[in-house]
């Protein structure tokens, strides 16, 4: 049976020591805290928020293993699968399975970002990962501005393949969202649909089964309220949560680059007492002076104080 991801699925950052190594103790703090919330259904590691492509193969395995250990295996860990070629991605998926991952978030081959993809190539990537590595797959829809944003027919074909049980949609084109999500829902009623629109949560929350977001690192309490409002189709409640979160959204996701959001997440986790510092790896860079104070003020305004990290860590 596939794992149940109907709810909040945070995409945790990868903490590093000040020397740049994987920070195991910090992984355990963050993973155990996120895993302590009723309604958190999984942790997606090694994605964009997790600086997955900045880690070596051995480090990727270590990150998966330590996040599994952070909740004693109670909360399923999903691994970002980012390898460029299909053979490379299959090998990455096999390592993830051996490390304890219960599913994979399948990134497009990165060459497609610039040049587009051949018809049928994405379907082959998912098929190979599932059949050769035994890893259940999340269909990942990239933004419309890229050349690897899958057309509706490609999404429908992938969603119909063996081993694909969920989709993480980040198309960031509301015309396409409003057209394609109902089509996916009609074709595959059992497909779990997750929004990853960190900066467009209000628009998408009424249509989905949950959220798979980097935002889940820093505001799980409010995101769980937002999901509950969406499930109840309670627009006023959803709008109220959105308004409370909006200063945080602005300070994390309205900056120059969406990748900069990863640095912001780490700064926010410092303010919430989960991380001791916000060390990132190149090509990410520290934020400009004053940014930490702006993020901290936004968190305080939203009522997001110190995290209550389980004492068993």
Image (cartoon, helix red, strand yellow):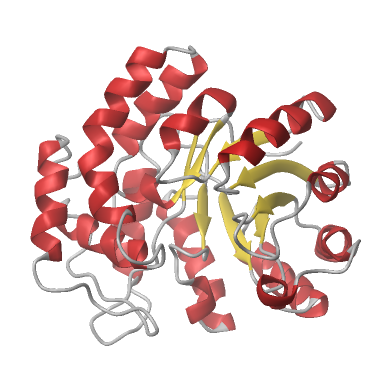
Quarter-of-image position of residue 200: top left
27 with respect to 114 (left or right): left
Q: Nearer the viewer, residue 114 or 24?
A: 114
Rendered location of residue 169, percent (x, y): 61, 45
13 with respect to 171 (left or right): left
Where is 195 relative to 276, above or below? above
Quarter-of-image position of residue 252: bottom left
Q: Residue furthest front?
A: 175
Rendered location of residue 211, percent (x, y): 50, 38
Q: Quadrant of the N terminus?
A: top right
Residue at 90% across / 63% down in the picture? 119
The count of marks equals 0
Let me know if residue 313 appears in the view: yes
Rendered location of residue 304, percent (x, y): 17, 39
Q: Nearer the viewer, residue 82 or 96?
A: 82
Residue at 23% across / 70% down in the picture? 278
Q: Nearer the viewer, residue 110 or 1?
A: 110
């Amino acid at each position: 049976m596939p794992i149940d991801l109907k709810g909040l699925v945070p995409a945790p950052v990868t903490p590093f020591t000040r020397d740049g190594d994987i920070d195991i103790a910090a992984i355990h703090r963050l993973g155990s805290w996120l895993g302590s919330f009723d309604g958190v259904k999984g942790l997606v590691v090694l994605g964009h928020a997790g600086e997955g492509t900045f880690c070596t193969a051995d480090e990727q395995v270590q990150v998966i293993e330590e996040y599994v250990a952070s909740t004693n295996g109670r909360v399923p860990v999903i691994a970002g699968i980012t390898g460029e070629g299909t053979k490379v991605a299959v090998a990455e998926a096999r390592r993830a399975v051996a490390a304890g991952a219960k599913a994979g978030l399948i990134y497009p081959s990165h060459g497609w970002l610039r040049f587009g993809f051949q018809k049928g190539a994405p379907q082959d990537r998912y098929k190979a990962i599932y059949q050769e590595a035994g890893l259940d797959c999340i269909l990942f829809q990239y933004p419309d501005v890229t050349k690897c944003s899958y057309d509706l027919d490609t999404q429908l074909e992938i969603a119909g393949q063996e081993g694909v049980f969920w989709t993480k949609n980040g198309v960031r084109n509301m015309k396409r969202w409003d057209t394609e999500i109902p089509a996916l829902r009609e074709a595959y009623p059992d497909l779990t649909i997750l929004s990853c629109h960190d900066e467009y949560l209000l628009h998408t929350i009424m249509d989905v089964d949950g959220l798979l977001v980097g935002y889940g690192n820093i505001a799980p309490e409010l995101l769980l309220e937002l999901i509950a409002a969406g499930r109840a189709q309670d627009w006023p409640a959803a709008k109220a949560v959105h308004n409370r979160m909006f200063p945080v959204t602005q300070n994390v996701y309205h900056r120059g680059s969406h990748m900069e959001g990863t640095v912001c997440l780490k700064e926010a986790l410092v303010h919430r007492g989960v991380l001791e510092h916000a060390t990132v790896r190149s090509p990410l860079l520290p934020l400009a002076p004053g940014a930490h104070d702006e993020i901290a003020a936004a968190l305080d305004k939203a009522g997001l104080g110190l995290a209550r990290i389980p004492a068993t860590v």
